[in-house]
Image (cartoon, coloured by chain):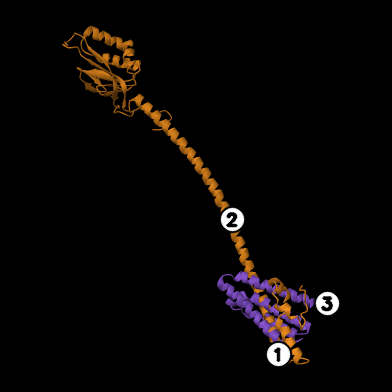
Amino acid sequence: MIAIAGLVIGILAGLFLEPSVPEGLQPYLPIAVVAALDAVFGGLRAHLDGIFNDRVFVVSFVSNVLIAALIVYLGDQLGVGGQLSTGVIVVLGIRIFSNVAAIRRHVFHA
Amino acid sequence: MSDDPHPRPGAPEPDQTRYVGLLTQVMSNTLDEDYTIVAQREGGAEGPRQRRPVRRWAVLSALAAFGLLLGVSALETVRDRPDVAAERAQLVDQIHAREGRLDALHSTLTNLQDEVTALQRTLVDGVTSDQHLADRLTALGVDSGTVAVTGPGVVITVDDAAGNGNGTGGTILDTDLQALVNGLWQAGAEAVAINGHRLTSLTSIRFAGQAITVDYRSLTPPYVVEAVGDPDTLPARLLETTGGQIWLSLHANFRIRFDTGTAEQVTVPADPRDHLLYARAKGGGG
């Protein structure tokens, strides 16, 4: 419950407060979203596995977002930002799919 | 997806330490290992986990941040869409405009090329007709005496008989010269001059007082008649004409000098009077 509440609060805040993203941070927003998505699905799966831990979730969430943004920033500085973004998205995408598959097994027992 | 979707708390160690391919590792280790490690640690130490409020708030704020990210991204995308679409439409418009301009320029180019071709043809025609006109002008100038002429021909020198006295008939008359010149024309001369005076269709040879005048200018003997024409045939054909016969008899009867010679280069000047006083071309201007 508390998780869904946080999610709803965050989305509503984003939509209605319309915080303006600084020009320099805009390229990292999509990557940060994907990384956060990975952390959230990982947390959900851990919850279903019965091994969820608040601290681990928060730490993994923050570090995921920061590291993904850092990698893309590094890539931008080295001139391979596009390729690194693709790499990060591929790896995170695979993890997201795997976690969702595990969640699906938990929910549908299939 | 993975072979082992349920990483048990007591997962066998060898699986984690053994090296597997990068892709396999990425595919199989989808869950943060921290969860299992912490679960192992806490699961052994305590029984049911205690959830402290601080941690709950941490989860809440993390998820709120996630929601914020989602909301902001969606908002950004939606906000940018009209700009992107407008930019794209503008580019499409520009492309169409440039294409239209290109087509127009192409057609202009084709028209200009056609024009150039037409003008070149006109120019060639003009040059050709100019050439014709120049040739015709030269021919007419030679015929009418307005153009100086040079070429092979004959030089005939005539003079009064030596020891000429009155009544002996040894004096050259204007009619004699007229007969000679007419004979030359008949024989095929193209241009004739007497003592450097070009003879044209308007030139008169007259007797005025004691002197013969050609074109109203008095001449003194000897008279040098130059004619441009074929030097091989001109003297012989001259003698066959009436004028030639007259001069042969003059030479024989009155010992009037009549020397005929050919020349490689005979120059006949132009008639200084190069315009007509009264005659006008009918229908034409000027």
Residues at circles 3 and 2 in contact by the CB criterion of under 8 Å: no
In this rendered view, identify the residue nearer to me: B57 or B24.
B24
- Mark 1 or mark 2, whichever is nearer to me: 1
Q: Position of residue B102 (x, y in %)?
A: 56, 53
Give the colour in which the image draws chain A.
Answer: purple
Identify the chain of the residue marked 1, using the numbered disc in the image.
Answer: B
Residue B56: give x, y in percent of width and height: 72, 89
What percent of the width, then of the height, locates residue A107?
Answer: 81, 78
Q: Amino acid at mark 3?
A: Phe
Q: Label 2, on which residue? A: B99
Q: What is the quadrant of residue B55 in the picture?
A: bottom right
Q: Count residues near mark 1 (Cα–Cα under 10 Å), then give few for <14, some for 14-19, many for 20+.
A: some
| Chain letter, colour orange | B
Determine whether the residue tagged by mark 3 lies in a helix, strand or loop: helix
Q: Nearer the viewer, residue B120 or B72?
A: B72
Q: Quadrant of residue B233?
A: top left
Q: Amino acid at mark 2?
A: Glu
Q: Are discs 1 and 3 located on one and the same chain?
A: no
Which residue is found at the position 67% from the left and 81% from the top?
B68
Residue A83 vs residue A96: left or right?
left
- Which SS class for mark 2? helix
Foreground label between 3 and 2: 3
Residue A73's quadrant in the figure? bottom right
Residue marked by disc 3: A108
Residue under numbered circle 1: B55
Amino acid type at image mark 1: Arg
The image shows residue B17 at horizontal and vertical percentages of 70, 78
Q: Is residue A69 left or right of residue B139?
A: right
Ranked by sequence position, the earlier of labels 1 and 2 is 1
Q: Disc 1 on helix, strand or loop?
A: helix
